[in-house]
């Protein structure tokens, strides 16, 4: 059967295997996160890849937690990871843990010792590391490398039974200390840790390493295709070496590791170590801070699962690492939110506008459609009065730049849904700061009326506004890029914090039209001409919203 050309390279590999006789019923995938932090946007790529391949081939997908390090893992991370996967719209076939297989892994390790492929090393970790040398040097064999099988089995059992202190000995695979691949230079399989495990408690005091655990768990669960990012490519020989050495049932399949490029986004970090540092130094608030690209942070910022999956589909699955511009991610959330967001007029940085010829006691309730993109959207009524608020940036006293079509003395603009106005003068305080703008309006220019006074009434700009009498205060969190420089290009990664943008978050009290009081937690709103916002909290008649993304791409301006 001819393989379709529009498939990604992993699909082509699977299709070729099926054509060569691999049974479709034995195809099985897994997503194996470590529960030591929150998932980030890079994980979305792996989640979508595994679960969508599962859907395509009607194959099960396991959610297997790689919980081999009790010092950093926690049940709260388990709950968060499961919640994130469900948010993205996926369901796993089986929930499992590496710790479920600790007893089997221990038996496998005994078998490797019996075959002469593993030994106990009681040298210090510093000596072990120094003996491994570099890929350009010949390694030095441990003095314990040729211990007898019986002695190794006895020592390993003592390790298991808590006879030794932490750091005094490890179990190492006996492979090749001269290999150019450093992963093959007698890697550690087990170490001693007297730490309580989130799932097994104090049952074990020896814990398997990721390298030893991963492939064997894939084999136990009969995962056909172990999909991982490119940084594990150098570990593939070790992955296969372990699988070749464990007791093998010919009726079972041998898992196949396939690597794909990881997802790197400009001006952000995904390293758990670095995120923990930012939290500890109070640079960000928590794992769900909207300025970092954890899934929880993206959700708190207002990103939808649909937009995130569309973004992943667009960048595709390849074997070439590259850095994706932040603006590409923002494009997909704008596209999604434009369809579903209710429109509101909100003034972030207000300046007072007085319409001199408008009746002081008059209030008009102007009908404006909630979402012009939605044919089923309803209308809302917005109060219009003599005194309004507009954005400070929408007015300059004297025009001093080209292509400025908003309000200035002598210029006309339209107030959205209402009338055309013309600015006549400004009043200032004793410091010379503009206190209020005075203008006139044209009664026959109301939006929706066919009659236009004359050609001179055609304007080039429409401004949003809010009545000073009927506005509702709303707390707005504005966000900018967290790093001023592309963190992925920083050579000295220990000093990444030097590139943090000190103005990445700004909290203000904005003035909104009263319809915002109808909002609910989780609503997506478009502040017209400004951006998209997400309602995070409502309590004691207080509304808190987070900026999701600006109306237009502003990232390049800040680059």
Image: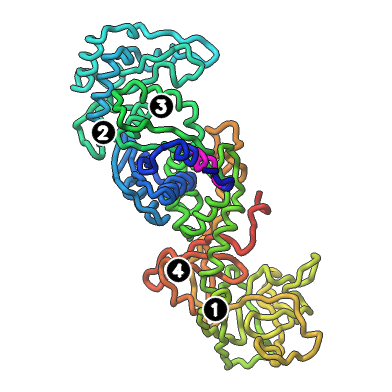
Numbered tag placed on residue 523 in the rendering: 4
Callout 4 secondary element: loop
Is the residue under label 3 in contact with that under label 1 (CB below 8 Å)?
Answer: no
Q: On the picture, is 46 further left or further right than 62?
A: right
For marks 3 and 2 on the same chain, the one whose residue lies earlier in the sequence = 2
The percent position of residue 237, horizontal first and vertical second, equals 45, 23
Does 487 sit above or below residue 185? below
Quarter holding residue 398: bottom right
Which mark's residue is nearer the viewer, 1 or 4?
1
| Mark-to-mark CA distance, 1 and 4 | 19 Å
Q: Which residue is mark 3?
A: 239
Callout 3 secondary element: helix
| Mark-to-mark CA distance, 4 and 2 | 43 Å
Callout 1 secondary element: loop
Q: Which residue is mark 2?
A: 101
Query: Does residue 85 show up magenta in the picture?
Result: no
Which mark's residue is nearer the viewer, 4 or 3?
3
For marks 4 and 2 on the same chain, the one whose residue lies earlier in the sequence = 2
Q: Which residues are magenta?
A: 7-13
Camera-nearest residue between 291 and 389? 291
């Amino acid at each position: 059967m001819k393989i379709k050309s529009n498939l990604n390279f992993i699909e082509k590999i699977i299709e070729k295997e099926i054509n060569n006789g691999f049974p479709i019923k034995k195809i099985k995938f897994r997503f194996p996160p470590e529960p030591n932090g929150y998932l980030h946007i890079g994980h979305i790529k792996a989640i979508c890849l595994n679960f969508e391949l599962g859907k395509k081939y009607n194959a099960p997908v396991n959610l297997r937690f790689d919980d081999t390090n009790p010092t950093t893992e926690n049940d709260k991370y388990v709950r968060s990871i499961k919640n994130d996967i469900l948010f993205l719209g996926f369901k796993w076939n089986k929930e499992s843990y590496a710790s479920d297989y600790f007893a089997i892994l221990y038996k496998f390790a005994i078998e490797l010792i019996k075959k002469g492929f593993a030994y106990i090393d009681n040298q210090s970790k510093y000596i072990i590391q120094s003996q491994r040398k570099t890929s350009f040097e010949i390694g030095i064999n441990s003095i314990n490398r040729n211990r007898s099988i019986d002695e190794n089995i006895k020592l390993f059992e003592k390790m298991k039974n808590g006879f030794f202190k932490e750091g005094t000995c490890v179990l190492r695979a006996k492979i090749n200390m001269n290999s150019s691949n450093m992963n093959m230079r007698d890697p550690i399989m087990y170490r001693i840790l007297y730490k309580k495990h989130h799932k097994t408690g104090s049952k074990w005091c020896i814990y398997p390493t990721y390298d030893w655990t991963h492939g064997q768990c894939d084999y136990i669960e009969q995962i056909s295709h172990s999909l991982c990012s490119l940084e594990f490519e150098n570990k593939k020989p070790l992955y296969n070496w372990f699988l070749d050495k464990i007791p093998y049932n010919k009726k079972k399949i041998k898992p196949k590791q396939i690597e794909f490029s990881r997802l790197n986004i400009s001006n952000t970090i995904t390293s758990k170590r670095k995120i923990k540092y930012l939290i500890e130094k109070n640079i960000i608030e928590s794992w769900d801070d909207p300025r970092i690209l954890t899934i929880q942070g993206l959700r708190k910022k207002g990103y939808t699962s649909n937009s995130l999956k569309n973004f992943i589909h667009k960048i595709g699955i390849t074997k070439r690492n590259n850095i994706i511009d932040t603006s590409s991610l923002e494009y997909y959330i704008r596209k999604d939110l434009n369809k579903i967001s209710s429109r509101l007029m909100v003034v972030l940085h207000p300046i007072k506008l007085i319409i001199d010829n408008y009746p002081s006691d008059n209030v008009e309730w102007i009908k404006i459609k909630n979402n012009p993109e939605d044919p089923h959207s309803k209308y809302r009524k917005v109060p219009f009065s003599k005194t309004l608020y507009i954005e400070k940036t929408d007015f300059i006293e004297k025009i001093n730049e080209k292509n400025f079509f908003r309000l200035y003395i002598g210029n006309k603009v339209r107030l959205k849904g209402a009338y055309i106005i013309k600015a006549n003068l400004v009043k200032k305080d004793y410091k010379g700061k503009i206190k209020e703008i005075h203008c006139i309006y044209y009664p026959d220019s109301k939006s929706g009326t066919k009659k236009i006074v004359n050609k001179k009434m055609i304007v080039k700009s429409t401004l949003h506004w809010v009545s000073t009498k009927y506005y509702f205060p709303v707390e707005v969190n504005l966000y900018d890029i967290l790093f001023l420089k592309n963190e992925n290009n920083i050579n000295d990664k220990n000093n990444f914090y030097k590139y943090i943008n000190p103005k990445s978050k700004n909290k203000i009290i904005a003035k909104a039209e009263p319809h915002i009081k109808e909002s609910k937690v989780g609503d997506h709103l478009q502040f017209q001409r400004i951006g998209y916002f997400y309602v995070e909290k409502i309590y004691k008649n207080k509304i808190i919203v987070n900026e999701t993304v600006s109306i237009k791409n502003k990232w390049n301006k800040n680059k």
